[in-house]
Image (spheres, rainbow, N blue to C red):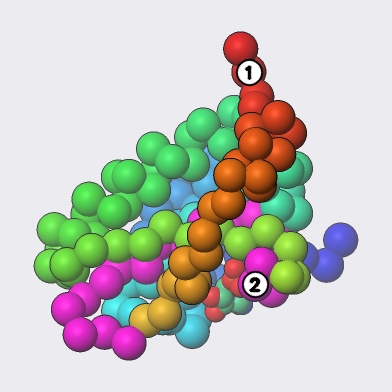
Amino acid sequence: MDCIFCKIANGEIPSATLYEDEDFRIILDVNPASKGHALILPKKHASNLYELPDESASKVLILAKNMAEKMTEALNCDGLNLVQNNGEIAGQTVFHFHMHLIPRYEGDRVKVGWKPGKLSDKTKEELLSALKIGG
Ligand code: 5GP
Ligand code: ZN
């Protein structure tokens, strides 16, 4: 399979690596939204969140947390967005799971947002009967 993030994650293509273990690599994004924008890549290919094994899913947020702490301390950022896109419609352009860490600075022009809608009672009821999980 010709997947650029497989090659980067596994070291076949060199990258600016901030962290590596047997399952993950964290790299600097080549087209950063802000100073320090980084990506967490699993070494084993999963196209998106739906394909990510539970074990990797549970590790990825701990890694994100550790990296976020380091960024905040070292870059003195004022906030940070975690972004993870699934599917073209959601903005995914590389179809190998990755989580963005985007440090935020007062006055930056980074846009991660949406126009708030309004949750109607009808839709709320529909969603409550369609979406409950667990229990
Ligand atoms: P997506 O839009 O799929 O959520 O994010 C893909 C990200 O990967 C983008 O922010 C893009 O700049 C980054 N990217 C794409 N190709 C490369 C690459 O070859 N090296 C690095 N370091 N980042 C890449
Ligand atoms: Zn891949």
The residue positioned 29% from the left and 68% from the top of the image is: 103
Amino acid under disc 1: Gly
Within 8 Å of ligand 1, the CB of disc 2? yes
Q: Which residues are magenta?
A: 90-109
Q: Quadrant of residue 71?
A: bottom left
Tell me the residue that label 1 is attached to: 134
Local SS, label 2: loop
Query: Based on the displayed image, in which of its 4 quarters is residue 57 positioned?
Result: top right
What secondary structure is found at the residue carrying circle 1?
loop
Residue 94 at x, y percent in the picture? 69, 69
Residue that mark 2 sits on? 91
Whether residue 62 is visible here, answered yes or no, is yes
Quarter of the image where the C terminus is located: top right
Give how far apart the Cα atoms at labels 2 and 1 are.
29 Å
Compared with 36, 74 (above or below) is above
Left or right: residue 102 compared with residue 84: left
Within 10 Å of the Cα at label 1, are there few (<14), some (14-19), or many (20+) other Cα atoms?
A: few
The reply to whether the C-beta atoms of the residues labelled 2 and 1 are less than 8 Å apart is no
Q: Nearer the viewer, residue 7 or 51?
A: 51
